[in-house]
Amino acid sequence: MELNERQEKILNIVKQHGPITGSNIAAQLSLTRATLRPDLAILTMSGFLDARPRVGYFYTGKETNDVISLKANNLLVKDVQSLPIVITCDTSIYDAIVKMFLEDVGTLYVIEKDKSLQGVLSRKDLLKGTMSFNDIENTAVTTVMSRKPNITMCYPDDSLLYAAKQLIDRQIDSLPVVSENKGILEVVGRITKTNITKVFVNLME
């Protein structure tokens, strides 16, 4: 559950003026008591508010961190994913290095012409390629990339928390976000440590 703007306003009113009746809260927001009833019910059931007959609503002391946790747990990958940086299977190691430098990313996703995910290319892979091959301008990235099934990926409707745990557990910089289309896994985005950090900063602010 994520609190909406009106519910957060109700919380602030109760913090400042509680205990306060539902009618008085509605008056401060220029709304009817009936309009606020669902929001008050949600806040009460979630533990943010408590209600006593003939007394009104009062704040239970649930901290902002709890609100942050609620918001974070409801974020999906598709809410924060960024555009994927892709190359094709016939791209040379040299061109991949240039691409990675120009795009200022740490991971490239290797696709076929049908946009299906074939591999993931990291800085370490490219470093290994430059040390292993003399002619990197004519050596395809397929010689050094990580291939399926050794690719950790996620889907747009996965929770952001799941994606973050994958980044930590696998000790990798990013995840390709894929969507199944006509039997193939098409790359539609990426989740990086930077994405996760931005979300954390925004929630704290």
Image: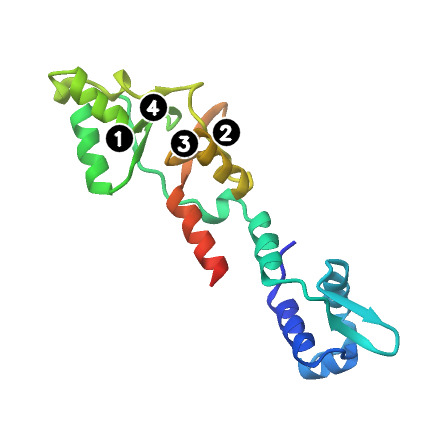
**Residue 89 in the image: x percent, y percent?**
28, 22
* Left or right of 95, for residue 18: right
Q: Which residue is mark 4?
A: 112
Q: Going from the N terminus, do you reach mark 3 or mark 1 first?
A: 1
Q: Which residue is mark 1?
A: 123
Q: Going from the N terminus, do you reach mark 4 or mark 2 first?
A: 4
Instruction: Report helix, strand or loop for mark 4.
Output: loop
Q: Amino acid at mark 1?
A: Arg
**Residue 155 in the image: x percent, y percent?**
51, 35
Mark pair 1, 4: CA separation: 21 Å
Q: Residue 81, relative to residue 132: is it above or below? A: below
Q: Amino acid at mark 3?
A: Gln
Mark pair 3, 2: CA separation: 25 Å
Q: Residue drawn at (44%, 35%), measured in percent from left and top?
A: 167
**Residue 9 in the image: x percent, y percent?**
62, 73
Instruction: Report helix, strand or loop for mark 1.
Output: helix
Instruction: Report helix, strand or loop for mark 2.
Output: strand
Instruction: Report helix, strand or loop for mark 3.
Output: loop
**Residue 164 in the image: x percent, y percent?**
48, 40
Q: Amino acid at mark 2?
A: Glu
Whether tag 3 and tag 2 are in contact, CB under 8 A, the answer is: no
Q: Quadrant of residue 139?
A: top left
> Which mark, by number, is residue 91?
none
Judge depth for marks 3 and 4 and give the one in front.
3
Mark pair 4, 2: CA separation: 15 Å
> Which mark, by number, is residue 180?
2
Q: Going from the N terminus, do you reach mark 3 or mark 4 first?
A: 4
Judge depth for marks 3 and 2 and give the one in front.
3
